[in-house]
Amino acid sequence: EAGVTQFPSHSVIEKGQTVTLRCDPISGHDNLYWYRRVMGKEIKFLLHFVKESKQDESGMPNNRFLAERTGGTYSTLKVQPAELEDSGVYFCASSRGLAGDDTQYFGPGTRLTVL
Amino acid sequence: QKEVEQNSGPLSVPEGAIASLNCTYSDRGSQSFFWYRQYSGKSPELIMSIYSNGDKEDGRFTAQLNKASQYVSLLIRDSQPSDSATYLCAVNADFGNEKLTFGTGTRLTIIP
């Protein structure tokens, strides 16, 4: 079974530019999560999809961030326009969402650097 | 006060000894507790989950939960150099709210 994959692994952009991160969850996992780790801080929740619906987006920092999950498969996270403080590692995770099995499996992350 | 607190380390333990990692959390209503291991540049990997007070053992790993004290720990017996990694404590506030709240992680080094 393939794990959670993320693309790109690294992205370096200038302030004001747009970046789109992609996450492919484990096949069959209805739940998809985005998290972010800023340098020196803990991993923080951004949002949670159940299939194509946003279940919880309470962690999204502001309206420069837009997440989509069309068709309930892969998800994208767009940052537009990027700011310096957006630099960090963006993790995606997925889970089955079944009772008694709430394990979240994480992808390798996308390291975003905004110059 | 941080929601989930861990000692950032680094924690150095001789090979073969027991490594003890600790975590406290502030939300008394928290229901699910997880320990993830993260090697440098890699994805966090779940190694233990615990939901009830007491101990849960899986191989060389034992998770301990004390909800009254809002404390969860991870013991690694017979530590191996391959156990050297950052260990992340994560808490799920309540059933139906699945977002994880993480601590900053404890960096563990096993000394051969």
Image (cartoon, coloured by chain):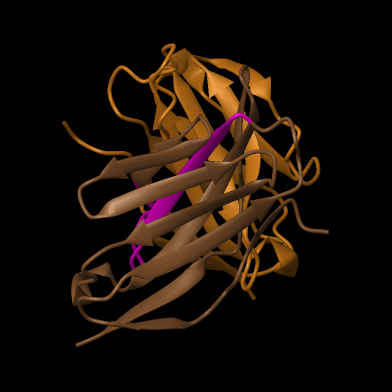
Chain colours: A orange, B brown
Q: Does residue A84 appear to the left or right of B81 in the view shown? A: right
**Relative depth, front residue between B82 and A20:** B82
Residue B38 position, x and y percent, is: 38, 61
Q: Does residue A39 appear to the left or right of B20 in the view shown? A: right
Residue B110 position, x and y percent, is: 29, 80
Residue A104 position, x and y percent, is: 42, 34
Specify the segment rendered in magenta.
Answer: B31-46
Vertically, is B4 above or below A56? Answer: below
Vertically, is A113 above or below B103? Answer: below
Based on the picture, tell me whether residue B16 belongs to the magenta stretch. Answer: no
**Relative depth, front residue between A14 and A34:** A34
Vertically, is A15 above or below A3? Answer: below
Of all residues, the one furthest to the bottom in this rendering is B112
**Relative depth, front residue between A61 and B27:** B27
Residue B31 falls in image quadrant? top right
Residue A24 position, x and y percent, is: 36, 34
Q: Residue at x 64, y 38 (%)?
A: B67
